[in-house]
Image (cartoon, helix red, strand yellow):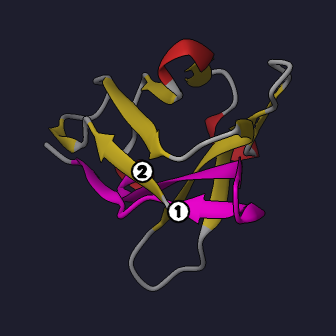
Amino acid sequence: QVQLVESGGGLVQPGGSLRLSCAASGSIFSIYAMGWYRQAQGKQREVVAEITGAGSTNYGDSVKGRFSITRDNAKNTVYLQMSSLKPEDTAVYYCKTDVRTVAGRRDYWGQGTQVTVSS
């Protein structure tokens, strides 16, 4: 089994910054791609940022130039640095990891962390 623990969400004023973390633990053989997704109330879940095992990144159009995704392979952790936050960034943010365990390879999702951008 794999557990993902997210942290770093909260309330921030427009223009502010937050850093999200997602740590994977369990019987992990390998972690491939890691990513962050978000779902605002009444909307579909969307890609925020993704990072491959080799470090290549991909960002949603709405966050390009403001958010940065990184990973620490030694800690099985992915980070999302969010800057110049806007009210429309308000959402529940979920991390996802592509993991190989003894049971095979599949995606795992975190429980989600609320980010609220408001004055």
Label 1 sits on a secondary structure element that is: strand
In the rendered structure, the answer to whether residue 84 lies left or right of residue 46 reads left
In terms of depth relative to the viewer, which is nearer, 78 or 81?
78
Q: Majority secondary structure of the magenta segment?
A: strand
Residue 48 x/y as whole percent = 63, 47
The amino acid on which the numbered mark 1 sits, given as a three-letter code, is: Trp
Q: Residue at x 42, y 38 (%)?
A: 22
> Where does label 2 land, which residue?
4
> Where does label 1 land, which residue?
109
Q: Residues within 10 Å of mark 1 (few under 14, many from 20)?
A: many
The amino acid on which the numbered mark 2 sits, given as a three-letter code, is: Leu
Q: Residue at x 51, y 59 (%)?
A: 38
Q: Residue at x 62, y 37 (%)?
A: 63
Residue 42 x/y as whole percent = 45, 86
In the rendered structure, the answer to whether residue 119 lies left or right of residue 74 reads left
- Quarter holding residue 3: bottom left
Label 2 sits on a secondary structure element that is: strand
Looking at marks 2 and 1 on the same chain, the residue that comes earlier in the sequence is marked by 2
Residue 97, numbered label: none
Instruction: Tell me if label 2 and label 1 are in contact, CB under 8 Å.
Output: yes
Q: Is residue 28 magenta?
A: no
**Region of the chain picked out in magenta, as a range:** 90-117
